Image (cartoon, rainbow, N blue to C red):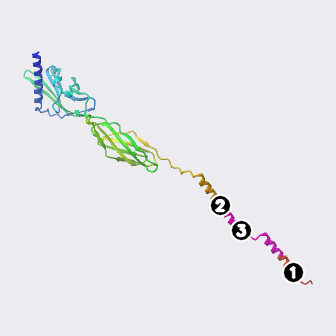
Amino acid sequence: MRFKCTMGLRNTLIVMALLLSVSTVPFSGAASLKSHAFFNETGELPCHFPNTQNLSLDELVIFWQDQNKLVLYELFKGQEKPNNVNPKYIGRTSFDQDSWTLRLHNVQIKDTGSYQCFIHHRRSQGLVSIHQMSSDLIVLANFSQPEIRLIANQTEKSNIINLTCSSIQGYPEPQRMYVSLNTTNSSSTYDAVMKKSQSNITELYNVSISVSFPIPPETNVTIFCALQLEPTKIILSQPYNIDAKSPVPSPPVPDHILWIAALLVTVVVSGMVFLTLKKRKKKQPGPSNECEIIKVEEKESEQTAKRTPRT
């Protein structure tokens, strides 16, 4: 029992000595390999050991550490050593012997950073560093598809529309959020100040904007909300369609107004007819006058005939 405890303590001291020594050993000069992983999924931390000497795992000491010198994984002479692993990484790693890659599971945003792998060969004179590599892990989280919500629809007297657009649970912080209004013949873009909040636990972002703008009532309109993550990467919402307004019909005339109008028309027409007939009577003599004129002419003719002597 004492021998086993002494061996365990010895292995721990060896790993601690390696950690202290690698902090002063310069890297091979190769650029860090960038690796991407998605939130809550698995990231890969490659080591790319060529193993030209075809060494077995029993001859090697392999371990990974993060940028804070915390150990993620250790393989000592072919055996995993969880006692030297930092608690935050216990149960989250698996080693692929074929590709010399360490897989980090259940990746969180806080796992973003630089990692190093170290391989030492056990020789008669002790451990000799034969390979080391640095990699940068970049953790991403896909934002939800932007969602448009109408705050207050335009009224009959106003064509102003008010809406919000939101997207949640993403990382890193997006560059821009805006609304695009499209008609048959035109397209307009409306920007607003992007409101953002970040979770203290997951470090994921929620973003939203509030926009007000006029819409043409005489044509159909399609609205999109756009979330710009990178210069060439944009997420669009589902289209929000607004149909053109139908022409507003004139209000019907009340029945009593129609009756009054008809009565006024009747009175006016009757008055005009009466005046017309009155004027005609003044211009044309009546039948009794004509008879009197004829009688006067007959008397004058008889008197003339009496006065004329017979020959």
Q: Is residue 56 visible?
A: no
Q: Is residue 99 left or right of residue 166?
A: left
Marker disc for residue 267: 2
What span is colored magenta in the figure?
A: 271-295
Position in image of residue 32 (x %, y %): 19, 34
Position in image of residue 1 (x %, y %): 11, 15
In percent of the image, x 87 and y 79: which residue is there?
302
Q: Is residue 288 visible?
A: yes
Residue type at mark 3? Arg
Position in image of residue 289 (x %, y %): 79, 72
Judging by the rendered image, the residue that carries numbered circle 3 is 280
Cα separation, mark 3 vs mark 1, equals: 37 Å
Q: Is residue 152 left or right of residue 87?
A: right
Residue type at mark 2? Val
Kindly indicate the quadrant of the structure image that contains residue 150: top left
Q: Secondary structure at mark 2?
A: helix
Quarter of the image where the C terminus is located: bottom right
Q: Is residue 280 magenta?
A: yes
Marker disc for residue 303: 1
